[in-house]
């Protein structure tokens, strides 16, 4: 007498059969697919991908899922994983947010001239620390000191890897174990939760706060002076503004006080603006040259914000003080490499011709471009999309506002035009996710239940690729 096996036994047999049909690692590697992968990708990467896919398939089977375990199906999955593992993690993307110096997206784009100088210098040996005329060892900062002096009017300059490092180095050089006087209203927090008090503490300097959050007077500084005072610090509010019942001590008055008591005055600008942008409708941001003319002993600013260059912290000021900074052992830990030096040199040299700088340095070009040009780009994106996606999404060119970003020009909103998308078959959030996860990623913003593609930060050369990505996301 025969009996029918229980259902659980049948299911167990099906799982066991599927597991037995799953290709082994060796089979995958010896297949025609495996030979192709090994010829194109590192063996370690291929092995990792094969093991990951086989392990994933095994788990699917054990969980009762029906899955294709043929060598063809498994190989398709392996190839996807191999390509993913072999791709660079740092990737170019399309910034459609309208935020010009987006900190999370790499801040300033380098100009073509800067990129060319980096490429030429990086692919060859260079005179980084070598004096060609004398045949002796040189200093890397000598390559940019002259151009910085010429543009800013400062006596000397040195460059480190970012502006936080610049402030830290100045404090360590002049105020270690001594007091630094700064207004409470200027105790800023910059990106990544780095705060002026914490930078000061790390330098060994002692913070002496004066005034209140909204009001600080000259007498507050003067009353705080003592034998332990090392310097006066003025921090420009480059990433926020306090408005209303407020008062602050102008840098000129602080410089006068510093001279009277023979104390150096350090001005931390944050963003380094080299061109008076008021003629382009952007107000409230002092130029580096204006700050130098106040008589501040040391001025620090970033290279990758309004300057439009690479990440760097530029320290300029009185020659005697800069030479002290150059002798600080910490400088070696903060120094810039040859690629940063090359891109910074090229960026500064572009400022010798203001009109060309505005047109050729991407950050300046995006901030100052005429509204008509932005509208033209938005209309072009709209016209390339409307024929193919009108049945899947509402589409319109809308007026909106962009921002500078990067901790710069916090109160300035720039009029802009964007392409508004309201999909019919998927949610706006799902559309945003599809664009973000595509290749290349498109980073846009959501406003009023619509996805906005801000034409201010979309480059002309990116328009066709952007359009194809939107079409694919809505298909």
Image (cartoon, helix red, strand yellow):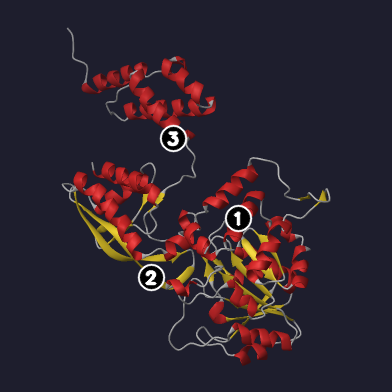
Q: Which residue is mark 3?
A: 84
Q: From mark 3 to mark 1, how far is it between C-alphas?
A: 35 Å
In-front residue for pair 193/5? 193
Where, by quadrant of the figure, is residue 169 drawn? bottom right
Does dot 3 land on a helix, a strand or a loop? helix
Quarter occupied by the C terminus: top left
- Between circles 3 and 1, the one closer to the viewer is 1
Looking at the image, which residue sits at the far top? 1
Q: Is residue 182 left or right of residue 27?
A: right
- The image position of residue 208, as x and y in percent, is 65, 81
In this view, 33 is above or below 427: above
The structure residue drawn at horizontal position 72% and vertical position 71%, both measured from the top left corner, is: 155
Find disc 1 in the rendering and name its residue. Answer: 346
What whole-number distance in Å separates the C-alpha atoms at marks 3 and 2?
39 Å
Give whichever of 358, 403 is nearer the camera: 358
Q: Earlier in the sequence, mark 3 or mark 1?
A: 3
Which corner quadrant holds the N terminus?
Answer: top left
| Image coordinates for residue 142, horizontal then vertical, percent | 73, 58
The residue tagged with tag 1: helix, strand or loop? helix
């Amino acid at each position: 007498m025969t009996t029918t096996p229980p259902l659980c036994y049948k299911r167990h047999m099906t799982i066991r059969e599927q597991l037995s049909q799953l290709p082994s690692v060796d089979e995958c590697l010896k297949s025609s697919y495996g030979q192709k992968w090994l010829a194109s990708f590192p063996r370690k990467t291929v092995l990792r991908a094969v093991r990951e896919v086989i392990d994933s398939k095994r788990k699917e089977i054990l969980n009762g899922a029906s899955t294709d375990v043929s060598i063809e199906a498994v190989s398709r999955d392996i190839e996807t994983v191999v390509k993913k593992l072999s791709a660079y993690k740092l990737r170019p993307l399309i910034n459609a947010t309208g935020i010009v110096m987006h900190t999370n997206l790499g801040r300033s784009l380098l100009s073509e001239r800067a990129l060319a100088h980096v490429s030429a210098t990086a692919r060859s040996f260079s005179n980084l620390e070598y004096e060609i005329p004398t045949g002796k060892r040189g200093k890397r900062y000598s390559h940019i000191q002259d151009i910085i002096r010429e543009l800013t009017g400062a006596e000397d300059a040195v460059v480190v890897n970012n502006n936080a490092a610049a402030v830290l180095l100045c404090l360590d050089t002049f105020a270690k174990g001594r007091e630094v006087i700064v207004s409470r209203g200027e105790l800023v927090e910059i990106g990544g939760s780095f705060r002026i008090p914490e930078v000061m503490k790390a330098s060994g300097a002692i913070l002496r706060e004066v005034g209140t959050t909204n009001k600080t007077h000259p007498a507050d500084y003067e009353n705080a002076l003592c034998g332990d005072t090392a310097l006066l610090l003025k921090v420009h509010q480059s990433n926020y503004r306090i408005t209303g019942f407020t008062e602050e001590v102008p840098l000129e008055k602080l410089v006068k006080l510093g001279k009277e008591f023979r104390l150096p005055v350090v001005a931390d600008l944050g963003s380094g603006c080299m061109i008076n942008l008021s003629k382009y409708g952007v107000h409230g941001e002092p130029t580096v040259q204006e700050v130098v003319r106040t008589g501040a002993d040391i001025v620090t600013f970033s290279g990758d914000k309004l300057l439009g260059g690479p990440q760097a912290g530029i320290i300029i000021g009185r020659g005697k003080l800069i030479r002290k900074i150059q002798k600080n052992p910490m400088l070696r830990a903060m120094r810039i490499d040859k690629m940063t030096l090359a891109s910074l040199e090229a960026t500064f040299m572009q400022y010798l011709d203001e009109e060309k700088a505005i047109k050729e340095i991407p950050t300046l070009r995006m901030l100052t471009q005429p509204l008509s040009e932005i509208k033209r780009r938005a209309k072009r994106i709209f016209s390339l999309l409307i024929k193919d996606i009108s049945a899947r999404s509402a589409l319109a060119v809308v007026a909106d506002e962009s921002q500078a970003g990067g901790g710069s020009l916090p109160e300035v909103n720039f009029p802009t035009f964007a392409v508004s998308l309201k999909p019919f078959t998927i949610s706006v959030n799902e559309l945003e996710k599809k664009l973000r996860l595509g290749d290349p990623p498109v980073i846009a913003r959501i406003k009023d239940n619509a996805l906005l593609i801000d034409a201010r930060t979309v480059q002309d050369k990116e328009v066709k690729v952007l359009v194809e990505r939107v079409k694919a996301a809505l298909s």
